[in-house]
Amino acid sequence: AKRQGKNQYFVYNMELDKMASRRMELEKDMQLALTKGQFVNYYQPKWNADTNYPTGFEALLRWKHPAYGIISPDEFIPIAEETGMIVSMTRWVLEQACRDCVQWNKHEPEPLTVSVNLSVKVFDSKNLMDMVLFALERSSLPAELLELEITETIVMNNVTDVVNQLKPLQDMGITISMDDFGSGYSSLGSLDLIPFHTLKIDKLFMQQSHSPAKRAVVNTIITLASQLNLQVVAEGVETEQQLDFLKASGCQVMQGFYFSKPMPRDQLDEWMAALNR
Ligand code: C2E
Ligand code: CA
Ligand code: CA
Ligand code: CA
């Protein structure tokens, strides 16, 4: 038994070693990955269940690592935030997303938006306005078609500073969306201080939508949004039951695997072409 314990300890240590060395390797490789073209924007549609048509797409970043394959943002975004790489990475995501949005709108009668996720580090860098202006100018995308997704934690971290950076962006016509709503410790009392247009209900609520209590919270968020004149989007919709529940509760715009997984730019065209309209 003693020996086994020792082996387990050994195996555990090896796992830790492997994780640490992967982490270091990713950190090192990340420096060149941008210029080597290893980052790819995937896009997931936001679906309007009233019109049965998408309203736009959210950019979700992927890293195509030559040795490790596709790496999830949950793994590399924290590293990029720690090293500061997140700023140049976001600059790239924004520019690519704006260019792609101009492309997919070429044949659309009703314009489709693009959403980009922002990290708190981008607010700390004070480069956000410059980055956004540059991306819009370069791509000629109208500001009205760009949406920025921020989490409640970002805002609560430093309300005044974040609001000061968001306000001019909102004045330009950019849409601000509160991501992962309901998952953090958001202060409902500060909601009216923050210039935003959309509440995105965290996907946790869909994963637990079998629970009457969770459904009650979702209904409350939807009512709150409507009373504050905010749009509401539900994420993580995977089943028809969840879709029906949301429609009955008055939430029209949804995102989730039920409609589509995030997909690369070329698949987006095929997906759009296959829609009935
Ligand atoms: P998020 O912004 O909350 O994005 C939603 C996540 O849920 C995405 O994971 C998406 O692929 C996943 N998802 C979508 N529909 C469903 C569904 O029906 N069921 C389930 N179980 N999951 C679904 P992903 O793409 O792995 O991204 C994870 C997180 O990484 C994002 O969470 C976002 O916080 C961050 N992220 C992604 N791209 C960027 C980026 O360009 N910049 C920054 N700062 N963060 C990013
Ligand atoms: Ca998001
Ligand atoms: Ca989210
Ligand atoms: Ca999230």
Image (cartoon, rainbow, N blue to C red):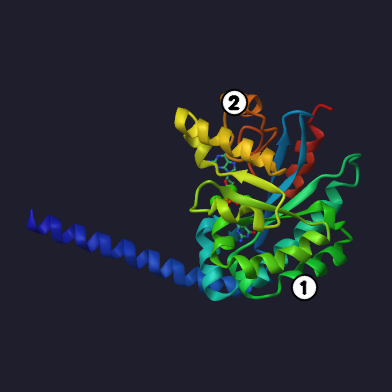
- Count of residue discs: 2
Q: Is residue 17 above or below residue 235?
A: below
The amino acid beneath tag 2 is: Phe
Q: Are marks 2 and 1 in contact (CB under 8 Å)?
A: no
Residue 199 percent coordinates (x, y): 64, 46
Residue 44 percent coordinates (x, y): 68, 44
Q: Residues within 10 Å of mark 2 (few under 14, many from 20)?
A: some
Q: Earlier in the sequence, mark 2 or mark 1?
A: 1
Viewer-nearest residue: 247 or 86: 247
Q: Is mark 1 within 8 Å of ligand 1?
A: no
Question: Given the current orientation, which residue lies at the most extreme front position?
Answer: 189
Q: Name the element at disc 2.
A: helix
Viewer-nearest residue: 234 or 222: 222
Question: Given the current orientation, which residue lies at the most extreme left position?
Answer: 1
Q: Name the element at disc 1.
A: helix
Viewer-nearest residue: 154 or 192: 192
Q: Is residue 62 above or below residue 208?
A: below
Residue 146 location, quadrant: bottom right
Residue 245 location, quadrant: top right
Residue 42 percent coordinates (x, y): 67, 51
Q: Residue at x 50, y 48 (%)?
A: 183
Taking the image as shown, residue 13 lies to the left or right of residue 231, namely: left
Residue 150 percent coordinates (x, y): 63, 57
Residue 102 seen anywhere in this rendered image of the structure: yes
Q: Say which residue label 1 marks.
A: 130
Quarter of the figure that contains the C terminus: top right
Taking the image as shown, residue 134 lies to the left or right of residue 41, namely: right
Q: Residue at x 59, y 61 (%)?
A: 155
Taking the image as shown, residue 134 lies to the left or right of residue 261, namely: right
Residue 67 seen anywhere in this rendered image of the structure: no
Q: Which mark is residue 245?
A: 2
